[in-house]
Amino acid sequence: MHNETRESDNLHIDIDHGLCIGAGQCALAAPSVFTQDDDGFSALLPGRENGGGDPMVREAARACPVSAITVSETGS
Ligand code: SF4
């Protein structure tokens, strides 16, 4: 079965902490995957490093004002 609305749960999410300015847009867009660490910078929630199938992961990457988030498919 092919379901276009479900995001792959085999994503690799990379946050470039050299770019991140702690704007928090990622955590706002996809709070089930992204959080902010004590310094306000983006972090992935434990166990959500693969995106957890959340379709908002790509939206979070788009929302980042400095394009610090890279989402790639790792294949199944
Ligand atoms: S949206 Fe971008 S700049 Fe803002 S916290 Fe997330 S990764 Fe960092």
Image: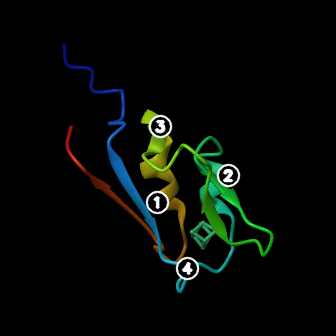
Q: Quadrant of residue 37?
A: bottom right
Q: Nearer the viewer, residue 67 or 32?
A: 32
User: Percent from the top left, x then y, of residue 67?
Assistant: 46, 73
Mark 4 and mark 3 lie on one chain; the one further toward the N terminus is 4
In space, the residues marked 1 and 2 are separated at their CA atoms by: 11 Å
Residue at the extreme right: 38
Pointer 2: what residue? 28
Which residue is drawn at the image coordinates 53% and 83% (left, top)? 19
Q: Nearer the viewer, residue 20 or 50?
A: 50
Q: Quadrant of residue 32?
A: top right
Q: Nearer the viewer, mark 2 or mark 3?
A: 3
The kind of residue on which mark 4 rests is His
In space, the residues marked 3 and 1 are separated at their CA atoms by: 15 Å
User: Percent from the top left, x then y, of residue 33?
Assistant: 58, 46
Is 73 above or below relative to 1? below
Pointer 1: what residue? 61
Which residue is drawn at the image coordinates 53% and 86% (left, top)? 18
Pointer 3: what residue? 52
Q: Are marks 1 and 2 in contact (CB under 8 Å)?
A: no
Pointer 4: what residue? 17
In space, the residues marked 2 and 3 are separated at their CA atoms by: 16 Å
Mark 3: few/some/many CA within 10 Å (<14, 14-19, 20+): some
In space, the residues marked 4 and 3 are separated at their CA atoms by: 21 Å
Mark 4 and mark 2 lie on one chain; the one further toward the N terminus is 4
In the image, which disc is placed on residue 37? none
